[in-house]
Image: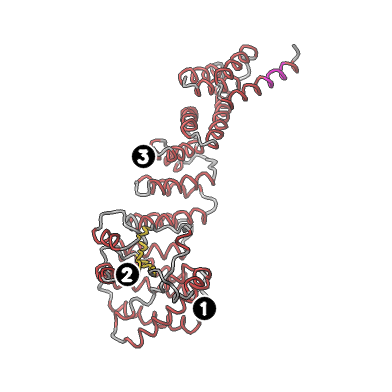
Amino acid sequence: MTLESASTESANLQQQAEQYLIRGSYDKAASLYEQAIEAEPELKSHYWHLGLLLLLQGQEAEAQITWLMGMEDGEPEQVDLWAVELMQVLQTEAQRREALAEYSVAWAIRQHGREISPTNINNLLHLIDLTIKLENFTGEELTSFGIIDLLQSELLLEVEQELLLQVLQSVLDDAPLHPSTLEFATACVAHIKEPQNFIDILIPASIEIAHSAKQPNLAAGFLEVCLRLNTDDTKILQYLSAFYQNAGDYSKGIEIAKVYYSVSQTLPQKVYANHLLLRGLMGAGGYWKEACLALHLHKSLLLSLIEEQPKLPDLGTAVCLFNSTYFVPYFADEPINSRYIQNQVSRLCQNNVQTYAKEQARYCQKSVSSRTKPLKIGYVSHCFSRHSVGWLARWIFQHHDRDHFKINAYFINYKQINDPLQDWYVNQVDQAYKGGGKVRKLPNKFTRMRLIF
């Protein structure tokens, strides 16, 4: 047999074995590779594939012995190269299984890959992703697999960016409160090439942690990680100031609000930054003189906003500015002046909301005079719980005319903790929608709802 014909026969054998593998005939494929090893014992890929097929049949010890047999006669440099080849074989099959949603099989293959190459960061990240998909993730795996230590090491790692961000998102969704999750996010920073993609993942997650899980201090920790990538990001600073204040760390909340104001480039940003400063000063107490100065500036900013009537950059800005006049009545009983400012700012925000949500606005403006069915009224708030507004608003719900109105409540940042008043509201409405802090695509029934502005 010539070298060319032997090569052709080997290629045909591998192709046939691959077909058996795809069909699930592992024993037949393994038999072919056993024949191939007898014919070409020096060709190491036969050992790698045979070991894989034994692994798929549940013969883990035999698989490991087969791989070791393929490496036993090599020098250290050769063994390293062969380990890379073996990892490629295992990764290819693991990827095929992942595409088929055969996550248990893929996990087992990658777990053996971890034993062969414990510093292969991308294999470890895939393992975390598979563990989450199998609903076996506890958070401890980030440490026990050595991922955090590896990311923090000085080793030159070629981390797949899309995979890293995908796993970070999955970990935040599955175990946001586990201590290792913040450590993992922190360790990722050194390997991020597109900072905005990283920030876009952490900001919504921090909002969820701060409001739904009632852990504003932990949420602030995630945003501090974001600041390492962009110290002037106004959105990071905006939420970070609020979270520190919510956690009772007013000094940091005030400090961040001042930084937010200093880097703000637009009038709407300056208005909201100064609102957060006022919020911190009023919440902390003992800052009356500074608060009065901040209020003086705030009125000036609000009047400029009313005069300029700027087009707000996005829907989120419009929603935030609705509340920017909140502290004006706290300082003086001047309802004529304060109400004028509140009404004008609210009108500006409302106009922008209608611009950014045209379809919903048109629906809301339709006449309801010909309706014969009870009108549905939706209340949207994050205060349907142990909150001053929550206590005071009870009578609105308790004394509604149930013959003419159906009442829905949309809980923003629904608390995942015991809250009797929140439960009371759930029981008072015809339909309760329990939302989190994340912005999700709403189902059709949400887009058809009639909002009362």
**Residue 140 shows which numbered tag?**
3
Q: Is residue 234 within the magenta segment?
A: no
User: Residue shown at 33%/77% (left/top)?
Assistant: 327
- Disc 1 marks a residue whose amino acid type is Pro
Q: Nearer the viewer, mark 3 or mark 1?
A: 1
Q: Mark 1 or mark 2, which has the lower sequence index? A: 1
Q: Element type at marker 2?
A: loop
Q: Mark 1 highlights which residue?
A: 310
Q: Element type at marker 3?
A: loop
- Disc 2 marks a residue whose amino acid type is Asp
Q: Position of residue 407 (x, y in %)?
A: 34, 66
Bin the neighbour count of mark 2 within 10 Å (Cα to Cα): few under 14, some 14-19, many 20 and up.
few
Q: Position of residue 55 (x, y in %)?
A: 49, 23
**Left or right of residue 295, residue 85 in this image:** right
Which region of the structure is painted magenta?
6-12
Q: Mark 3 or mark 1, which has the lower sequence index? A: 3
User: Residue shown at 56%/29% (left/top)?
Assistant: 84
> Real-space Cα distance between discs 1 and 2?
43 Å
Q: Mark 3 or mark 2, which has the lower sequence index? A: 3
Please identify the quadrant where the C terminus is shown.
bottom left
Which residue is nearer to you in this view: 418 or 277? 418
Is the Cβ of the residue at disc 1 closer than 8 Å to that at disc 2? no
